Image (cartoon, coloured by chain):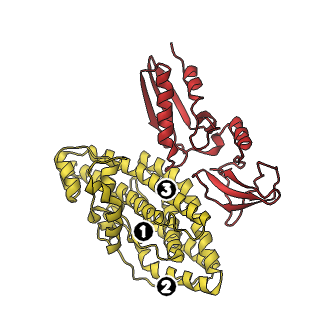
Amino acid sequence: MQSQLTNQSINQLLYTLQIADNALINGHRLSEWCGHGPILEQDIAISNIALDHLGQARSLYQYAAEQFNSFSTEEKLKMFTSPALQQKIEHGEMLDEDDLAYLRDGWDFRNVLLVEQQNGDWAYTVARSFFFDTFNFFFLTALQNSKDETLAAIAEKSLKEVAYHLRWSTEWIIRLGDGTEESHQRMQEAVNDRWMYTGELTQASDADKVLEQSMGVDLSIIAGQWKDKIAAVLNEATVKMPSGTWMQQGGKQGIHTEHLGYVLAEMQFMQRAYPNMEW
Amino acid sequence: MISKDDIYNWLSTVTDPEVPVLTILDLGIVRDVAVEGNEVTVTITSTYSGCPAMDVIAMNIRMALLSHGMKKVNIENQLSPAWTTDWMTDEGKRKLKEYGIAPPIRKSLSSLDLFEEDVVACPRCGSEDTTLTSQFGPTSCKSLYKCNSCHEPFEHFKCH
């Protein structure tokens, strides 16, 4: 009984981190457009969306830290293997949202591979956003009914923001796909190229499987909703839906593409070089 | 003896740093107040998850209450139910319009179709012939419009 409880709480933390890491890494990628947007209004739009993701990540990391801090010392030591974080844990320090964002190495991150992919051009960015926002919208809608009240509350709040994000990325897919010959071709290329990273969104990790029945979301249902929405929008955008079924995976297990390392190097540099600094 | 009303009175001097004409009571982000002697707990809810104004607002609440002699001020953040512009007071909406920001007009639960836009009246000339420039503005809570009658650009406090 004791070990089952432990298993449940560890998976609950991993589950929270999956959602948090998607928000943080996606938010960071989008924030890279700040000051580089094609026009001022879109620069502002994408920065706003990035900020929503960072806000959502903060709520989730605060909750993850709260869960972690309630673990026994033995459990705590087994949870992560990133040296900088491990050092803190060994000293018996409590963790906070910043520790989880800045002191974990790539292998302790649980985000899907899709969100860490490079921005590329505007078509690649909106393809990535559209695939992720569609998932996020249906996922958070379902998570509102979680028995975990904190996750349900975060989902309820985030969903209102994610509805704007989905509308924004959907409109861009249609605008570019059903635009000029060149915009159509480049939108199609981006959709084709990012397609292999979409399977992982609804592929259940161990944490997903353990929590599905109690406080998580049934990803097989989300997979159907996701596919229907994507098909409808791509059809309207005159973009051909890719047919490939071979999918990249690994992010939810901490096995990432090389791109995550570059994101973390930039995002974490200050805390690693000057530990505990604030400004 | 300090009452709940006193606390609300003092809170009515705390404004949103991004939209200084609105008090936090106009915005509807104060969810509860509990007083016990010299200790007070104010429960607030953030507008948007990433709103940077929230930290400043929390600090200003603390300052306002401490300056009135409260000894201990706890600020709790409540996530659910999620904040909505339906909680903004009519007084708040009036002040927004006077300030030059078109107030929220629609119930937050109704949603728009793709490419559909709200008909938002220009806060300057009142014309309803306006065009959405972007759903995202200088702060999370606002979108950008331009008026086709008086040609002024203006901000709209989104229905959220």
Amino acid residing under circle 3: Leu
The circle on residue A115 is 1
Label 1: which secondary element: helix
Contact, CB < 8 Å: mark 2 with mark 1? no
SS at badge 3: helix
First in sequence: mark 1 vs mark 3: 3
Residue drawn at (31%, 60%) of the image:
A269
Protein chain holding label 2: A
Q: Which residue is mark 2?
A: A243
Q: Mark 2: which secondary structure?
A: loop
Q: Using residue B96 as the reference point, say whether residue A271 is left or right of it.
A: left
Q: Report which residue position mark 3 lands on.
A: A51
- Residues at marks 3 and 2, common chain? yes
Residue A241 at x, y percent in the picture: 54, 82
User: Which tint was used for chain B?
Assistant: red
Residue that appears at 47% across and 62% down: A31
Specify the amino acid type for callout 1: Val
2 or 1: tag closer to the N-terminus: 1
Which chain hosts label 3? A
Q: Does the image show residue A110? A: no
Q: CA distance from mark 1 to mark 3?
A: 15 Å
- Ranked by sequence position, the earlier of labels 3 and 2 is 3
- Chain the render paints yellow: A
Q: Position of residue A188 (x, y in %)?
A: 55, 83
